[in-house]
Amino acid sequence: MENKFVYYNKTTGKVLSDEEAKAEWEQASRENRPSNMALASVNNLVIEDGYVKEKIRHTVAELIDKSKEEKERTVQTVPLEALIPETPPVQSGTKSKDDIINEIIEEAKSYPTPTEQYSVDDIVDEFSSKKDPKYFDKTQEFLTPRDTMELFTAPSATPLEETAEDIDNPDYALKVLRTAQVRSYASNYERILNSSVSKRTATQTEPAYERSGKRKGIKYGALTKSLVAVASVAILISAGNQFAKGVEALTNEMDYSSSVNVLSTEYNDDINFVNKNKITIEGSFDSYGHPAFWIDTQRVAQDILDMPDESYIGSLYMAYSQMGNDRANGPYNNWDDTIYYIGSNVDETHPKAYATTFGCANFKDFLVKAGYVDPETNEPSVELFEKAGRQAVIDFATYTQDEDPDRGGRI
Amino acid sequence: MIDVEVVTLEDNKEYYVLREVENYLYLVNTADENDITIRKNVKKDGKDFVQKLDNEDELKKALEVFANN
């Protein structure tokens, strides 16, 4: 099973070369808009004559089987040259480029696998300093947060593998980087909170420090890690806030030809990524199927729940309006993107909610069936639902793989 | 090499300005890449100053601004 990623134009489906992808990224940056391309595994695409014709949806059973196949196959070693710019960032003196590459490979192999504790310092510091021009633009030093998440949510048909040989694989390296990124959320948020927010009392004056305009030179790439840290926190906070807006819009919407999918059930041990909330929520804004928010805190097996074909096997996904979701196609055609996407797509000009109903008459009915009931009044509680949704985002972000690698989750 | 604005905050620590969006500044300590802080720009007597955020709600707003730009 080939483990290769390609960029393709989201509008035309054209598979892009590295040069074309970079050009689109640069153009999008100049125009301050999301790039019009997606990154996907070739395993999830049907490509004909250089165009993506179809996206492949995999059932959970297929993914589990593929995971088993992956473990049995021989991993092809891919040189880490793709992660290293033509000119090594560190002038090594008498060392040759091959010496440096070998050192990087040996050092990367020493990093713990994702089931062990590791810090973002280890991973980000290593891989972000050896930039692959395909992913990092030298003129700006770092991708925008939107493009960062777009890149870092590259989908895969297989759960995260945990072999030392995979460290040689740039794709796996990026997965590790992304895993570290989302795991850094919790600690970074607290750190930023403590350093940024005033603790003064009402009678105290908060000191202010003059901006002198002083500037300092810094090596290209030296600020990458800090930007990653802020971006990881910022995007998840934004997602949580948008979810709350979505809830508000749903509760304000009186015309419930719309309602909310509710899937509340137990999950057997064969399903990866089990979240304590055990609720799948699906909603959409505007009649075009413009995706609004989906909180799927568990992966739902199609054959277990007997869901219609148009339902998706979910992951934690909140459609993100500025991530360039395809208005015309909704979440089902963005199957690859939905696996790891985080964000929200609450379009305030289209507050009308629309969704497919599975056993719920309306939103209040959903709240009751899902257990979001105020224990004192026994009335449906939007606050509990909202709290659960926010927590679901955080749970996803800080989710760590199960100790048993066979049950490891996907991020 | 690139030139980045630096500001001096409490205890005379210098911080690089990672990004500035609207009136929020995203800063990192020049001596510690893990020391990240978010402040806001305020104007006094025609000059620009950097100040802490009022509360956690403002922090979340600043983070959302970062994410959306």
Image (cartoon, helix red, strand yellow):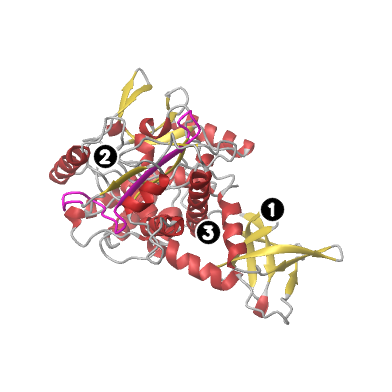
10 Å crowding of disc 2: few (<14), some (14-19), many (20+): many
Residue A388 position, x and y percent, is: 40, 58
Can I make out residue A17 in this image? yes
Cα distance in 3D space between marks 1 and 3: 16 Å
Q: Are marks 2 and 1 in contact (CB under 8 Å)?
A: no
**Which secondary structure lies at badge 1?**
loop
The reply to whether the magenta stretch includes residue A317 is no
The answer to which quarter of the image holds residue A308 is top left
Cα distance in 3D space between marks 2 and 1: 40 Å
For mark 2, name the chain: A
**Which secondary structure lies at badge 3?**
helix
Quick one: quadrant of the N terminus of chain A? top left
Q: Amino acid at mark 1?
A: Glu
Residue range in magenta is A267-290
Pick whichever of labels 2 and 3 is earlier in the sequence.
2
Give left or right: position of A313 versus B29: left
Residue ID at (47%, 25%): A11
Magenta stretch: dominant secondary structure: loop
Query: In front here: A200 or A167?
Result: A200
Q: What residue is shown with label 2?
A: A157
For mark 3, name the chain: A
Residue A233 position, x and y percent, is: 49, 58
Q: What residue is shown with label 3?
A: A230
The reply to whether the magenta stretch includes residue A272 is yes
10 Å crowding of disc 3: few (<14), some (14-19), many (20+): many
Give the answer, above or below, for where A68 lies relative to A238.
above
The answer to which quarter of the image holds residue B30 is bottom right
The answer to which quarter of the image holds residue A274 is bottom left
Residue ID at (58%, 41%): A348
> Which residue ends up furthest to the right in the rendered image?
B45
Residue A284 position, x and y percent, is: 45, 37
Give the answer, above or below, for where A360 lies relative to A409.
above
